[in-house]
Amino acid sequence: MISAREESVYNSYLYASRTSKNKPFRPRRNFAKMEDQDIIYLKKATAFLQRYNHINLSDWFIAPYKVYGKDEYFDLHFYNTRKALKCYTTYIKQREIEDPDNGDAIDRLKSSLHFIYDYCHENKITLETYINEFTGNLPTFLQHIKEHKINFYMLQTLEVEPILRKIEPSILNFIVSDFWSVFVQTRTKFLSSKVLKVKARKGKSLIKTKLTVENNQL
């Protein structure tokens, strides 16, 4: 028996394998004739993704095509291997340090800005409070980095390096592998960017002003 969640996972897998090769995608509706071995792989993959629910489905399945090339093919079994996890980690790291002025990086920055505004608005806090807020023993923004709600270019926008310097490197590396390497690379690229830096600082200023006005009205 295939659950609704497993159907969603399978169709995310199918979407990645088809679109990576520029082929049309049609979601699978009938799973009655699915091979028994594929059902086992699908259930294992779904259980893994539920256990690590910060992993984005689309990113998980597209990662090997981005790392190894679109001419490769990766079956369901591959996504139950350590190699799949390594691929995902590599892809996420590559994406973090991509050219800040390309369209994808700017879109991700906009998503980060929207997320932070929504989070602060829902929790009735200012941007300054968010930057200094802790969840447990760690800054909340690190949890959001781990969950890919925001990215490293957003960290550069928020200017949180002084806070990060107070945290043990081993803890940061547990959250993101080679944390400081990624941070330094994105800082250099952020400061030399022509488009993203301007949009980031403008977006930050707008959010800061809007949240301050909202909280003063409470």
Image (cartoon, rainbow, N blue to C red):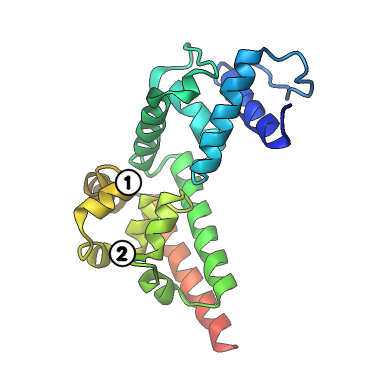
Helix, strand or loop for disc 1: loop
Q: Picture quarter containing residue 118? A: bottom right
Q: Residues within 10 Å of mark 2 (few under 14, many from 20)?
A: few
Query: What residue do we see at 40% from left, 30% from top?
Result: 85
Helix, strand or loop for disc 2: loop
30 relative position to 165: left or right: right
Q: Quadrant of the N terminus?
A: top right
Residue type at numbered disc 2: Glu
Sequence-first tag of 1 and 2:
2
From the top left corner, tell me how far across and down residue 205 is, in percent: 44, 70
Q: Picture quarter containing residue 171? A: bottom left
Q: CA distance from mark 1 to mark 2?
A: 18 Å
Query: What residue do we see at 74% from left, 22% from top?
Result: 28
Check the image and report above or below for 95 versus 73.
below
Query: What residue do we see at 70% from left, 15% from top?
Result: 34
From the top left corner, tell me how far across and down residue 19 is, in percent: 60, 22
Of residues 206 and 59, the one drawn nearer to the viewer in this rendering: 59
Q: Which mark is residue 176?
A: 1
Check the image and report above or below for 137 versus 27.
below
Pointer 2 residue: 159
Number of marks in the image? 2
